[in-house]
Amino acid sequence: MKAELEAIQAEALEALKAVKTPDALESLRITYFGRRGKLTDVMKGMGTLSKAERPAIGKLANEVRTTLTQAFEKATEALHHQQQAQQLEAESVDITLPGRKPAYGKAHPVMQTLERIEAIFSQMGFQVATGPEVEMEYYNFDALNTPADHPARDLHDTFYLEARGWKQHPQEEGEDARSERLLRTHTSPVQIRVMENQKPPVRIIVPGKAYRVDYDVSHTPMFHQVEGLLVDTHATFSELKGVLASFVRQMFGEQTQMRFRPHFFPFTEPSAEIDISCTVCQGKGCRSCGHTGWIEILGAGSVDPEVFHAVNYNPAEVTGFAFGMGVERIANLQFRIPDIRTFYENDLRFLRQF
Ligand code: DAH
């Protein structure tokens, strides 16, 4: 039995050296100390020894147990340290490596242009007003002096909502067709909404989305406009010119020329279209300006008295001017983009350039 004990001790100590994982250590522990373990077996066998043998063997058995218990404890601790070291290494960070830059977002180029337009007019004292994109026919056309049989209405290829069966608010008994819903074709209806709710003076700009059935290099079905409206006791056409000249110079540079061409809009009289000297060729004539040297950027005019009637303003007491511009068109000139549609293709390679 003495030899057996010594063999067990030697064998166990040897086996411990080879242990690399907590699982292996545990199974080794069971091999020796478990209920059916080798050491346990020997201990159980002590009962069969003679009285003379028992003290010496018992003492030896206890020594072996103590030795092995300590050896197992040491191995457990060593494994634990080893694992901690491995984990530390796995989690270590090389602080000398360059960091990862967070990707930051920024405003869409059309929004950048819109914000610039807003900033220029705000500084001239215009306040920002907004209105609904789903609009009533009345505000989009009628109140702007464009009744149903007016030819100007055909100029706008309108997205009607109800006529297409998308009606959401059933027309009430007696409600007339003027309350038919559409996607506003311009931001001008906000002029009416503001004047209905506010006494003169009015000095607003209206940035926002507008919609038309249109799709080519210079048109997308959704686009942005900035409307302007100034109403006061003595608002004049020359003030309109001054405001727009100031805008054009700030937006496109001091050297930019501007010209007014007579035009027609139902809601202004007289009306004009405003051209600026081509930003690409400086007015010499190139492909961008169709070799005319001029590019149209704005519609404007003196508010038509009919519009004042619609909002219960007295045209004998107030005058006003209004203007409207397409934001994509201006962004186009600012960034020299040949095709407006690229703004809305969401190609990041394109958008990252701004
Ligand atoms: N609403 C016009 C359009 O979409 C632009 C416009 C022209 C607005 C003249 C105005 C204006 O306020 O006076 O084409």
Image (cartoon, grey):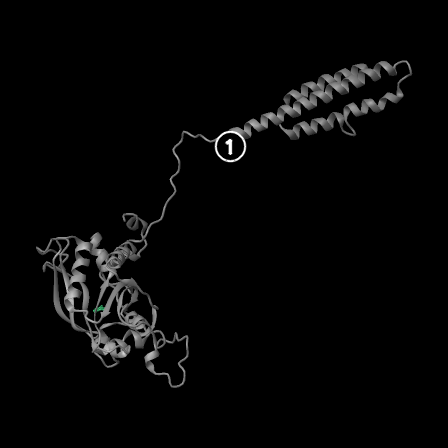
- How many numbered circles does the render carry? 1
Q: Quadrant of residue 152?
A: bottom left
Q: Quadrant of residue 337?
A: bottom left
Query: Which of the pair 312/4 is nearer the observer?
Result: 312
Residue furthest toward the right? 51
Q: Does residue 84 appear left or right of residue 103 in this picture?
A: right
Residue drawn where x is 88% and y is 14% of the image: 53
Query: Which of the pair 323/333 is nearer the observer?
Result: 323
In which quadrant will I find the N terminus? top right
Residue drawn where x is 34% and y is 77% of the image: 180
User: Is residue 145 visible in this depiction of the protein?
Assistant: no
Q: Does residue 72 appear left or right of residue 91 in this picture?
A: right
Query: Which of the pair 9/199 is nearer the observer?
Result: 199
Residue drawn where x is 19% and y is 67% of the image: 299
Query: Which of the pair 207/106 is nearer the observer?
Result: 207
Point out residue 94 in the picture as x, y percentages from the top left corner: 44, 30
> Amino acid type of disc 1?
Glu
Which quadrant contains ligand 1? bottom left
Point out residue 171 in the picture as x, y percentages from the top left corner: 39, 81
User: Is residue 169 visible in this depiction of the protein?
Assistant: yes
Q: Which residue is mark 1?
A: 91
Q: Residues within 10 Å of mark 1 (few under 14, many from 20)?
A: few
Q: Any atom of ligand 1 within 8 Å of the CB at mark 1?
A: no
Point out residue 138 in the picture as x, y percentages from the top left corner: 31, 77
- Depicted 122 relative to depicted 140: above or below: above
Q: Does residue 176 appear left or right of residue 323 in this picture?
A: right
Q: Which element is circle 1 on?
A: helix
Point out residue 168 in the picture as x, y percentages from the top left corner: 41, 75
- Depicted 316 relative to depicted 21: above or below: below
Residue furthest toward the bottom? 174
